[in-house]
Image (cartoon, rainbow, N blue to C red):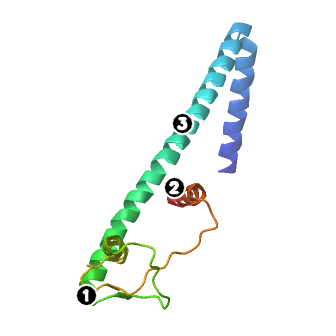
Amino acid sequence: MLEHIIRLSDAASVAAAAAENTGTALDKLSLGGSVAVMGLAIVFLGLISLIVITVVYPKITKALLAKSGKAKTKRADSAKPEKPVVAEKKTASVAAVAPAEDDVLIAVITAAIAASLGTSANGLVIKSIERTGQNVPAWGARGRIEQVYNRF
Protein backbone atom coordinates (compact mmCIF):
# COMPACT_ATOMS: atom_id res chain seq x y z
CA MET A 1 0.00 0.00 0.00
CA LEU A 2 2.89 2.32 0.79
CA GLU A 3 4.39 1.59 -2.64
CA HIS A 4 1.07 2.53 -4.26
CA ILE A 5 1.02 5.88 -2.45
CA ILE A 6 4.62 6.56 -3.45
CA ARG A 7 3.83 5.77 -7.10
CA LEU A 8 0.82 8.12 -7.00
CA SER A 9 2.95 10.84 -5.45
CA ASP A 10 5.63 10.40 -8.09
CA ALA A 11 3.02 10.50 -10.85
CA ALA A 12 1.51 13.68 -9.45
CA SER A 13 4.88 15.41 -9.20
CA VAL A 14 5.74 14.40 -12.80
CA ALA A 15 2.37 15.73 -14.03
CA ALA A 16 2.86 19.00 -12.13
CA ALA A 17 6.35 19.45 -13.59
CA ALA A 18 5.05 18.77 -17.10
CA ALA A 19 2.23 21.29 -16.63
CA GLU A 20 4.68 23.92 -15.47
CA ASN A 21 6.90 23.46 -18.48
CA THR A 22 4.17 23.35 -21.14
CA GLY A 23 1.86 26.15 -19.98
CA THR A 24 2.21 29.71 -21.16
CA ALA A 25 2.26 32.68 -18.83
CA LEU A 26 -1.31 33.55 -19.82
CA ASP A 27 -2.47 30.01 -18.95
CA LYS A 28 -0.77 30.19 -15.59
CA LEU A 29 -2.29 33.62 -14.90
CA SER A 30 -5.78 32.47 -15.82
CA LEU A 31 -5.39 29.37 -13.62
CA GLY A 32 -4.24 31.54 -10.70
CA GLY A 33 -7.14 33.94 -11.24
CA SER A 34 -9.69 31.14 -11.32
CA VAL A 35 -8.26 29.68 -8.12
CA ALA A 36 -8.43 33.11 -6.44
CA VAL A 37 -12.02 33.67 -7.56
CA MET A 38 -13.01 30.20 -6.36
CA GLY A 39 -11.38 30.84 -2.98
CA LEU A 40 -13.16 34.19 -2.59
CA ALA A 41 -16.48 32.61 -3.56
CA ILE A 42 -16.06 29.88 -0.95
CA VAL A 43 -15.15 32.41 1.75
CA PHE A 44 -18.12 34.64 0.97
CA LEU A 45 -20.50 31.68 0.88
CA GLY A 46 -19.23 30.68 4.31
CA LEU A 47 -19.73 34.22 5.62
CA ILE A 48 -23.24 34.44 4.19
CA SER A 49 -24.13 31.10 5.77
CA LEU A 50 -22.83 32.36 9.14
CA ILE A 51 -24.98 35.49 8.82
CA VAL A 52 -28.05 33.40 8.02
CA ILE A 53 -27.36 31.12 10.98
CA THR A 54 -26.96 34.04 13.39
CA VAL A 55 -30.23 35.59 12.20
CA VAL A 56 -32.26 32.38 12.15
CA TYR A 57 -30.91 30.77 15.36
CA PRO A 58 -32.54 33.21 17.84
CA LYS A 59 -35.89 32.80 16.09
CA ILE A 60 -35.65 29.03 16.30
CA THR A 61 -34.70 29.08 19.98
CA LYS A 62 -37.54 31.49 20.83
CA ALA A 63 -40.01 29.21 19.07
CA LEU A 64 -38.66 26.14 20.85
CA LEU A 65 -38.73 27.90 24.23
CA ALA A 66 -42.29 29.05 23.65
CA LYS A 67 -43.29 25.55 22.61
CA SER A 68 -41.64 23.94 25.64
CA GLY A 69 -43.14 26.61 27.92
CA LYS A 70 -46.63 25.78 26.66
CA ALA A 71 -45.99 22.08 27.18
CA LYS A 72 -44.75 22.70 30.73
CA THR A 73 -47.80 24.79 31.62
CA LYS A 74 -50.11 22.14 30.20
CA ARG A 75 -48.38 19.44 32.25
CA ALA A 76 -48.34 21.60 35.36
CA ASP A 77 -52.04 22.45 35.00
CA SER A 78 -53.01 18.82 34.56
CA ALA A 79 -50.71 17.56 37.32
CA LYS A 80 -51.87 19.75 40.20
CA PRO A 81 -55.40 20.73 41.14
CA GLU A 82 -56.22 24.41 41.33
CA LYS A 83 -56.06 25.83 44.79
CA PRO A 84 -56.28 29.40 45.97
CA VAL A 85 -53.05 31.34 45.86
CA VAL A 86 -52.52 33.92 48.55
CA ALA A 87 -50.16 36.82 47.89
CA GLU A 88 -49.57 38.85 51.00
CA LYS A 89 -47.20 41.31 52.57
CA LYS A 90 -46.93 42.11 56.23
CA THR A 91 -46.86 45.86 55.70
CA ALA A 92 -49.85 48.14 55.62
CA SER A 93 -51.22 49.34 52.31
CA VAL A 94 -50.59 52.86 51.08
CA ALA A 95 -53.67 55.07 51.37
CA ALA A 96 -52.58 57.52 48.66
CA VAL A 97 -54.98 56.01 46.09
CA ALA A 98 -58.64 57.00 46.06
CA PRO A 99 -61.12 54.22 46.97
CA ALA A 100 -62.59 53.95 43.43
CA GLU A 101 -59.14 53.77 41.89
CA ASP A 102 -58.03 51.36 44.62
CA ASP A 103 -60.49 48.69 43.45
CA VAL A 104 -59.30 49.04 39.86
CA LEU A 105 -55.66 48.91 40.93
CA ILE A 106 -56.25 45.78 43.01
CA ALA A 107 -58.09 44.15 40.10
CA VAL A 108 -55.24 44.90 37.71
CA ILE A 109 -52.59 43.65 40.13
CA THR A 110 -54.61 40.52 40.83
CA ALA A 111 -54.95 39.82 37.11
CA ALA A 112 -51.21 40.36 36.58
CA ILE A 113 -50.27 38.00 39.41
CA ALA A 114 -52.74 35.38 38.18
CA ALA A 115 -51.32 35.65 34.64
CA SER A 116 -47.74 35.29 35.86
CA LEU A 117 -48.64 32.27 38.01
CA GLY A 118 -50.75 30.72 35.26
CA THR A 119 -53.85 30.32 37.44
CA SER A 120 -57.24 31.95 37.60
CA ALA A 121 -57.81 35.06 39.70
CA ASN A 122 -60.74 33.50 41.58
CA GLY A 123 -58.77 32.20 44.55
CA LEU A 124 -56.17 34.97 44.62
CA VAL A 125 -56.30 37.33 47.62
CA ILE A 126 -54.36 40.60 47.78
CA LYS A 127 -53.95 41.68 51.39
CA SER A 128 -51.91 44.86 50.93
CA ILE A 129 -50.17 46.89 48.26
CA GLU A 130 -47.01 48.84 48.88
CA ARG A 131 -44.95 50.86 46.46
CA THR A 132 -41.27 50.03 46.45
CA GLY A 133 -38.58 52.60 45.85
CA GLN A 134 -36.62 52.42 42.60
CA ASN A 135 -33.09 53.68 42.28
CA VAL A 136 -33.01 53.20 38.50
CA PRO A 137 -34.83 55.45 36.01
CA ALA A 138 -37.57 53.84 33.96
CA TRP A 139 -35.54 54.00 30.74
CA GLY A 140 -32.63 52.17 32.41
CA ALA A 141 -34.84 49.39 33.74
CA ARG A 142 -36.54 49.04 30.35
CA GLY A 143 -33.17 48.78 28.62
CA ARG A 144 -32.07 45.97 30.93
CA ILE A 145 -35.32 44.11 30.38
CA GLU A 146 -34.93 44.39 26.60
CA GLN A 147 -31.35 43.11 26.79
CA VAL A 148 -32.41 40.08 28.81
CA TYR A 149 -35.25 39.22 26.42
CA ASN A 150 -33.10 39.73 23.33
CA ARG A 151 -30.59 37.17 24.60
CA PHE A 152 -33.21 34.45 24.62
Q: Mark 2 points at which residue?
A: 150
Asked if the residues shown at circle 3 and circle 1 are in contact, with their CB atoms under 8 angstroms apart, the answer is no
Is the residue 34 above or below the residue 124 in the image? above
Q: Name the residue at 52% across, 47% down.
A: 54
Mark 1 secondary-structure assignment: loop
Q: Name the residue at 54% across, 34% down.
A: 45
Q: Which of marks 2 and 1 is in front?
A: 1
Q: Which mark is residue 82?
A: 1
Q: Name the residue at 63% across, 28% down.
A: 40
Could you tell me residue 12's position as x and y percent?
A: 68, 31
Compared across the picture, whether 54 is left or right of 39 comes to left
Labels 2 and 3: the sequence-earlier one: 3
Labels 3 and 1: the sequence-earlier one: 3
- Dot 3: within a 10 Å radius of its alpha carbon, few (fewer than 14), some, or many (20 or more) residues? few
Q: Mark 3 points at which residue?
A: 48
Mark 3: amino acid: Ile
Q: Name the residue at 27% across, 76% down.
A: 74
- Dot 1: within a 10 Å radius of its alpha carbon, few (fewer than 14), some, or many (20 or more) residues? few
Q: Which of marks 2 and 3 is in front?
A: 2
Mark 3 secondary-structure assignment: helix
